[in-house]
């Protein structure tokens, strides 16, 4: 049941890289979603070695993106940083680089223009990523983040961009926290099919905390109905890892081993059973 479980590193945010790797091994979690900040602190070569020694699979590298700057120098630096991220992903053995595309530049109200710059950046980066064997994975974020973090807010928007590129070069991320509300989500998951590069899970807490970035909870603590979303992923043919990615200050205040244990328990309860169903048997939502 746990064969596809991945612990996104931000869920145990205060664990160092070595603590996260050792914690996954201790809990029997076979994969980890890596964050660049932790790689830089621990060292890329040391991270690669430790992952191999632990026989731990990397499900994704987070994050690249932030393509929307209108200033030419800032855009050049963003593209250079994304090339560095692609190189890191390749060395880590990650199948994809998660992309948070960026919000509106300061003082800018041109939303269509910002989205065009995302497409332009992907056109520059996709060949470089393909040569490195890395898939770029667009992550649509909930619309409340549109101004500051991601001008791509729905799975339909992400697919509209991704479909301009070969499926093996640019995919999309389905994150339950960001898509659960969308009345078109099941149609778009079916449309996505082989473009689904990553499936991330967490719950939507009610009431929403003051800091909207930290509104995620452990599965079962909020209001997301996970079974239909899981069935939709299965019907779409998704066969990759399932990352538990939670931003939550109360959770982060707990010892890392308690968080990891809770992740395993909630995954087994709310997510894992659905992915025991074979592809042929999986009912559509």
Image (cartoon, helix red, strand yellow):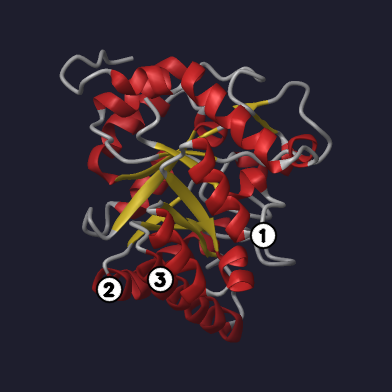
Q: Secondary structure at mark 2?
A: helix
Between 183 and 38, the residue placed more toward the observer is 38
Q: Residue 86 — which label?
A: 3
Label 3 Cα crowd, 10 Å radius (few <14 / some 14-19 / many 20+): many
Q: Is residue 31 visible?
A: yes
* Residue 267 coordinates in the image, percent (x, y): 50, 25
**Residue drawn where x is 67% and y is 66% of the image:** 105
- 151 on left or right of 189: right
Q: Secondary structure at mark 3?
A: helix
Q: Secondary structure at mark 1?
A: loop
Q: Is residue 76 above or below residue 253?
A: below
* Residue 109 coordinates in the image, percent (x, y): 66, 59
Instruction: Tell me which label, 1 or 3, sits earlier in the chain.
Output: 3
* Residue 205 coordinates in the image, percent (x, y): 70, 25
Instruction: Tell me which label, 2 or 1, sits earlier in the chain.
Output: 1
Quote the CA–CA distance across marks 2 and 3.
Answer: 11 Å
- 5 on left or right of 188: right
Q: Residue 109 — which label?
A: 1
Between 37 and 76, the residue placed more toward the observer is 37
Which residue extends farthest left? 280
* Residue 282 coordinates in the image, percent (x, y): 24, 16
Which dot, 1 or 3, sits closer to the camera? 3
Corner quadrant of residue 148: bottom right
Q: Is residue 245 above or below residue 73?
A: above
Instruction: Tell me which label, 2 or 3, sits earlier in the chain.
Output: 3
Quarter of the image that includes the C terminus? top left
User: Which residue is tagged 2?
Assistant: 127
Corner quadrant of residue 189: top left
- 145 on left or right of 83: right
């Amino acid at each position: 049941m746990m064969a596809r479980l991945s612990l996104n590193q931000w869920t145990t945010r205060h664990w160092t890289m070595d603590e996260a790797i050792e914690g996954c091994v201790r809990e029997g979690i076979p994969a980890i979603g890596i964050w660049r900040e932790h790689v830089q602190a621990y060292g890329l070569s040391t991270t690669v070695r430790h992952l191999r020694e632990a026989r731990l699979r990397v499900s994704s590298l987070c994050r690249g993106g932030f393509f929307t700057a209108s200033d030419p120098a800032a855009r050049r630096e963003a593209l250079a940083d994304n090339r560095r991220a692609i190189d890191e992903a390749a060395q880590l053995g990650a199948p994809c680089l998660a992309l948070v595309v960026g919000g509106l530049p300061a003082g800018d109200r041109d939303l269509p223009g910002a989205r065009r710059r995302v497409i332009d950046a992907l056109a520059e980066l996709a060949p470089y990523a393909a040569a490195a064997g890395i898939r770029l994975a667009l992550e649509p974020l909930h619309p409340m983040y549109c101004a500051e973090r991601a001008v791509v807010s729905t799975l339909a928007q992400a697919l509209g961009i991704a479909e301009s590129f070969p499926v093996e070069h640019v995919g999309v991320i389905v994150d339950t926290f960001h898509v659960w509300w969308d009345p078109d989500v099941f149609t778009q998951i079916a449309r996505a099919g082989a473009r689904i590069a990553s499936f991330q899970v967490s719950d939507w807490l009610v009431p929403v905390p003051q800091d909207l970035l930290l509104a995620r909870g452990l599965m079962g603590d909020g209001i997301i109905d996970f079974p239909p979303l899981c069935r939709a992923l299965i019907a779409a043919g998704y066969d990759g890892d399932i990352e538990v990615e939670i931003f939550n200050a109360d959770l982060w205040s707990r010892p890392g081993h308690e968080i990891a244990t809770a992740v395993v328990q909630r995954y087994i309860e709310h997510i894992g059973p659905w992915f025991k169903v074979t592809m042929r048997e999986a009912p559509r939502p």
